[in-house]
Amino acid sequence: MDFLPTEIEMYVEAHTQQESEVLKELNRDTNANVLTPRMLSGHLQGQVLAMLSKMIRPKIILEIGTYTGYSAICLAQGLEPGGVLHTIDINEELEDMIKKYFHKAGLENIIKLHIGNATKIIPAMAGPYDIVFIDADKENYSNYYDLVFDNVRKGGYIIADNVLWSGNVIKPENEMDEETKALVSYSKKVHADGRVENVLLPVRDGLMIARKK
């Protein structure tokens, strides 16, 4: 996941808007007490998501994959007044931690947490979404894309995390695991979809950004 030389990464982070105190605390708490803390968006990617959201000025955001809530807090920074962010996660064990930090960030009335299987929850939700952020089980990325697409407004964005998967996406196919194959398939699917414009940013573990035409 660390594609940049350490010195360059340090320089980039030193010249990027710093984390809020709540995000710093959440970062520390996640790394100290939650399994696989590398799943956290973290400082640089979090600020990229916040900046994109502030540029887009969304009214409705859908996040698929909450983890401990870091990316949701970042994305919510750009919401228009009266806007809402819906975030879905299957891990009910993290619910109390997530809600604690949404409260600390003053976003408990703006971010709506849904616990359960996203493939079951998404069809019951209504858009139109200005931003969809996909950061959940990799094998379902293409399914999530299809499930949300019609509810993304024209000019809206679908952003997917981990599309470089620590560089595993450029391995020979016979050396790829199922998650890697799914991510390669997702990037090919988006790139070939004439309904969107797309760019793959090599930020952290890769962000595929698709804009609906």
Image (tube, rainbow, N blue to C red):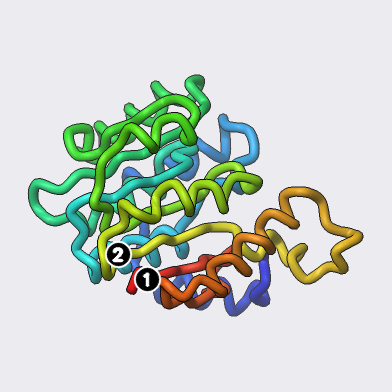
For this view, does 179 lie left or right of residue 138? Answer: right
Q: Residue at x 52, y 26 (%)?
A: 91
Q: Observer-nearest residue: 25 or 39?
A: 39
Q: Which mark is residue 156?
A: 2
Residue 98, image x and y in percent? 39, 31
Q: Residue at x 44, y 46 (%)?
A: 147
Q: Which mark is residue 211?
A: 1
Residue 125 falls in image quadrant:
top left
Q: Which mark is residue 118?
A: none
Q: Residue at x 52, y 37 (%)?
A: 30
Does residue 105 show up?
Answer: yes
Q: Quadrant of the N terminus?
A: bottom right
The relative height of residue 63 versus residue 32 in the rendered view (above or below) is below
Determine whether label 2 and label 1 are within 8 Å by CB.
yes
Judged from this view, the residue extending furthest toward the right is 174
Circle 1: is it few (<14), some (14-19), or many (20+) Cα within 10 Å?
some
Does residue 20 show up?
Answer: no
Name the residue type under label 1: Arg
Q: Secondary structure at mark 2?
A: strand
